[in-house]
Image (cartoon, rainbow, N blue to C red):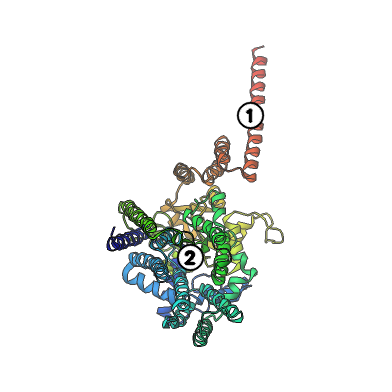
């Protein structure tokens, strides 16, 4: 095969790979819960002409009784993302959901292209570059939330590229690092990662200079440290200055992310039967110790520190998996290229190595063709996620019927409600600005009856009911399922009780309104029978159970629903089936309690039958 044909095959392979990857990124609809409060804030900034000084969307966070214990975090969340929020808002207003989906895909695509260009500039073999870009592309499909963090992903790749480029070529491109860091600091708190990456390269170069191992001339060294220091300093020029460092690094804020999926280990999702393993990430993670063994002490210090740091971060939280994929794709690619040169290229004669390259080129083309063939069967989505995370019809119902008074709303739906209903205010959204409100939401959602140390006016009133009365809630807007696939206990309590009436329900949402005189007309018009709510929930979770044979929470939810209905035998069956998927202590205790209760009922039934039989004998006599 001639060199020209080899280059054509290689080029075609990458064109197919990037085309298929970008096309596949368009498949997911606009789904992220956080997106909506981001564009709601962007709209607020554009219409009001200034950044919000207090929360404009929630009535609970601004109440005097809910004095915020973490005002600096609230200030950070209100102002840090302003530039990205304005961009997202303008794109959505102009092009709709399709525009946001395109921007989302473009940002991830550009991150992959940046890594590709960095590997090419570093002289990494085409087949190695193909492997790492493919792994990075596959990892990106797990990072498709429409949030400002997408800009952090792109800027992480660009920062790495500029630093590596200067180390290798001493060009002027390093000067772009300053405006990138300035823009980054006004879009997302992830600029902290950029500062860390720059600091690692600075430390590595300073140590090399001290050991007289630096490849920089004095002029290059002056340029490098001047630009990198300036790049770090300009990050202070944002509405919250350097609050991002304390928010990201201080453990006192951990309470806000506890239980949130993206802050859980990627392995915990698999262990808890919530999500599948990210095999592209696992492969990249496995390659790190391999490169340490192969390269041993030859690995660059900055590369080692960054790979180690991002590797550990990715093990602790899902949100860092793609950041590790970015760093690993570039740095492991460079290090493996050195290893391939040492292990193969210098040991094989030129003709043999040429045959190896041809074999890899053919494999690349075949892989790219198969990838493209699998992708083109699908169809891009340019709409919002009506069926999974965006309660559009339920909010239409609220608007059309002009529901009044304070609402208690689902945590995940708060952002969409802020976008659709402002200036009507919500109870909470995924920003979780106020720790008091965050706790109260959790207590209501899980129908907690009592918490040690917290007293209510009437000790006989369950805590969750007392909270609803405290905030004078008139209607309740909840999801029919949590993100983990469970029914909220409060949904069952509200359905079973007499104080609240269901007036709307679809596959995503359910709305209850307080049973009082002021609501008599809407109740008369839209009242839903409790039995319908139960039947709809049973149908939903039975369908979810059949669609997902791993997650036990659908079956556990069926057990809870049947228990609330008094169908204890069905509840026990559902729990037993769930236990076949997950042997969790609380689940096993529920099964034990139900079995004991059913045994008592059966014993009572047998006793009653015996007594009736004895009575009949007496009558016959």
- Residue 602: mark in rendering: 1
Q: Which mark is residue 231?
A: none
Circles 2 and 1, Cβ within 8 Å, touching? The answer is: no
Q: Quadrant of residue 101?
A: bottom left
Residue at 63% from the left image edge and 71% from the top image edge = 250
Q: Position of residue 598 (x, y in %)?
A: 63, 33
The residue sitting at 42% across, 51% down in the picture is 506
The foreground one among 587 and 15 is: 15
Of tags 2 and 1, which is closer to the observer? 2
Give the secondary structure at mark 2: helix
Q: Residues within 10 Å of mark 1 (few under 14, many from 20)?
A: few
* Left or right of residue 599, residue 193 in this image: left
**Residue 515: image x %, image y %?**
51, 55
Quick check: 192 above or below 566? below
Mark 2 vs 1, N-terminal side: 2
- SS at badge 1: helix
Taking depth in this image into account, of 213 and 578 the one nearest to the observer is 213
> How many numbered marks does the figure carry?
2
| Residue 408 visible in this rendered orientation of the protein | no
Structural crowding at the residue carrying mark 2, measured as other residues with C-alpha within 10 Å and reported as few (<14), some (14–19) or many (≥20): some
**Res. 256 visible in picture:** yes
Give the vertical position of 494 relative to 228 (above or below).
Answer: above
The answer to whether residue 412 is above or below residue 612 is below
**Residue lying furthest right:** 453
Using the image, tell me which numbered label, if any, was put on residue 338.
2
Left or right: residue 157 versus residue 103 is right
Q: CA distance from mark 2 to mark 1?
A: 74 Å
Q: Percent position (x, y) of residue 194?
A: 51, 74
Query: The N terminus appears in which quarter of the rendering?
Result: bottom left
Residue 319 on image: x %, y %: 52, 63
- Quadrant containing the C terminus in the rendered view: top right
Residue 31: which quarter of the image?
Answer: bottom left
């Amino acid at each position: 095969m001639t060199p020209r044909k080899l280059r054509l095959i290689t080029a075609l392979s990458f064109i197919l790979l990037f085309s298929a990857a970008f096309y596949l990124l368009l498949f997911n609809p606009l789904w992220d819960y956080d997106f909506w409060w981001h564009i709601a804030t962007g709209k607020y900034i554009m219409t009001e002409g200034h950044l919000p000084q207090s929360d404009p969307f929630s009535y609970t966070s601004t109440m005097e009784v809910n004095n915020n214990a973490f005002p600096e975090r609230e200030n950070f969340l209100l102002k840090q993302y302003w530039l990205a929020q304005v961009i997202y808002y303008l794109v959505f207003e102009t092009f709709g959901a399709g525009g946001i989906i395109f921007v989302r895909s473009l940002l991830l695509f550009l991150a992959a292209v940046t890594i590709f260009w960095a590997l090419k500039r570093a002289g990494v073999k085409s087949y190695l570059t193909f492997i790492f870009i493919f792994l990075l592309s596959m990892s990106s499909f797990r990072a498709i939330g429409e949030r400002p963090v997408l800009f952090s992903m792109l800027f992480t790749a660009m920062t790495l590229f500029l630093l590596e480029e200067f180390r290798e070529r001493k060009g002027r491109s390093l000067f772009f690092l300053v405006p990138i860091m300035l823009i980054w600091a006004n879009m997302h708190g992830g600029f902290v990662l950029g500062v860390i990456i720059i600091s690692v390269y600075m430390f590595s170069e300073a140590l090399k200079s001290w050991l007289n191992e630096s490849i920089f001339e004095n002029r290059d060294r002056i340029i490098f440290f001047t630009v990198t220091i300036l790049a770090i300093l300009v990050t202070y020029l944002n509405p919250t200055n350097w609050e991002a460092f304390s928010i990201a690094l201080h453990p006192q804020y951990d309470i806000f992310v506890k239980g949130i999926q993206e802050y859980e280990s990627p392995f915990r999702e698999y262990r808890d039967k919530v999500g599948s393993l990210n095999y592209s990430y696992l492969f990249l993670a496995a390659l790190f110790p391999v490169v340490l063994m192969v390269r041993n002490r030859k690995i660059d210090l900055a590369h080692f520190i960054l790979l180690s740091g991002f590797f550990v971060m990715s093990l602790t939280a899902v949100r860092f998996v793609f950041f590790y994929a970015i760093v690993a794709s570039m740095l492991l690619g460079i290090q493996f290229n050195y290893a391939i040169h040492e292990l193969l290229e210098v040991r094989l004669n030129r003709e043999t190595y040429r045959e190896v390259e041809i074999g890899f080129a053919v494999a690349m083309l075949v892989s790219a063709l198969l990838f493209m063939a699998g992708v083109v069967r699908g169809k891009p989505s340019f709409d919002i996620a009506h069926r999974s995370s965006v309660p559009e019809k339920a909010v239409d119902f609220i608007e059309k019927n002009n529901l009044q008074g304070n609402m208690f709303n689902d945590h995940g739906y708060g952002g969409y409600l802020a976008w659709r209903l402002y200036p009507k205010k919500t109870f909470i959204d995924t920003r979780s600005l106020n720790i008091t409100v965050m706790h109260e939401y959790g207590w209501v959602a899980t129908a907690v009856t009592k918490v040690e140390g917290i007293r209510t006016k009437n000790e006989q009133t369950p805590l969750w009911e007392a909270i609803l009365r405290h905030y004078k809630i008139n209607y309740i807007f909840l999801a029919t399922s949590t993100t983990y696939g469970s029914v909220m206990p409060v949904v069952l309590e509200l359905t079973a009780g007499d104080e609240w009436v269901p007036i709307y329900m679809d596959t995503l949402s359910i709305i209850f309104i307080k049973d009082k005189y002021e609501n008599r007309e809407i109740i008369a018009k839209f009242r839903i029978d409790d039995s319908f709510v139960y039947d709809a929930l049973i149908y939903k979770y039975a369908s979810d159970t059949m669609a997902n044979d791993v997650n036990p929470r659908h079956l556990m939810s069926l057990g809870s629903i049947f228990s609330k209905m008094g169908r204890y035998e069905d509840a026990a069956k559902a729990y037993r089936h769930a236990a076949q998927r997950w042997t969790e202590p609380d689940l096993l205790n529920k099964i034990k309690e139900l079995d004991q209760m059913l045994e008592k009922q059966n014993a009572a039934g047998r006793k009653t039958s015996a007594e009736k039989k004895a009575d009949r004998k007496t009558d016959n006599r």
